[in-house]
Amino acid sequence: MTPQSDEDEVWRQIVASFNDTAERDAADQPWPDSENLPSEPLRRVVKQSEEDERPSVKDDSAAEGGGDDAEQEDPDDEGHYVPPPPPPLPRTDATTKVAWLGLFGGPAYLLLSAALNWNLQGWMLFTAVAAFIGGFVALVVRMGDGPPNDSGWDDGAVL
């Protein structure tokens, strides 16, 4: 037999056993037996109401199949975090708004005029570039690098 025919025979065996299920014993599993899922559907004990003290058994197989129980929310579910609404954005003054408009408006106008093949005169090009540079400089100058005015005399940590 040639090495090519051996390889062909191995491929035939692989293709023939493609849909077969593998039988694994407990020694081949990379996890302990206690973490295996049960073959029968899960059952939970759920209280019907606060006054009714008799627990009832609920079948989870309908929830897994997408039944009506899957659409109802569990009132005892406390595992989901609902963040508080975000605080409102700070109010800006007119100078900051004009600076942001120049920072993004100048290059946007240049890109739009290039995409639409507009003929730009010299003063339009100068105004767009000056708006970009002026908006950037205005935002950097207004940014400030010192501590806030209401930080008090001590700039250390508060314990």
Image (cartoon, rainbow, N blue to C red):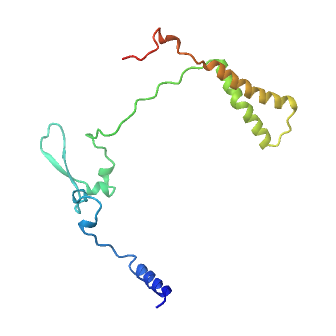
Q: Quadrant of the C terminus?
A: top left
Instruction: Give whichever of 1, 34 is nearer the camera.
Output: 1
Compared to residue 99, the image places residue 41 above or below, namely below
Q: Quadrant of residue 117?
A: top right
Instruction: Give whichever of 75, 30 is nearer the camera.
Output: 30
Compared to residue 70, the image places residue 107 above or below, namely above
Q: Position of residue 148 (x, y in %)?
A: 52, 14
In the image, is 51 to the left or to the right of 82? left
Q: Residue at x 43, y 79 (%)?
A: 15
Q: Residue at x 26, y 57 (%)?
A: 61
Q: Residue at x 40, y 29 (%)?
A: 84
- Considering every residue shown, the one lying at the far left of the view is 54
In the image, is 104 to the left or to the right of 153? right
Q: Quadrant of residue 51?
A: top left
Q: Position of residue 120 (x, y in %)?
A: 85, 35
Q: Position of residue 23 (x, y in %)?
A: 29, 72
Instruction: Give whichever of 48, 116 is nearer the camera.
Output: 116
In the image, is 122 to the left or to the right of 133? right
Q: Residue at x 73, y 34 (%)?
A: 107
Total residue callouts: 0
Instruction: Give whichever of 106, 139 is nearer the camera.
Output: 139
Compared to residue 1, the image places residue 121 above or below, namely above
- Considering every residue shown, the one lying at the far top of the view is 153
In the image, is 20 to the left or to the right of 60? right
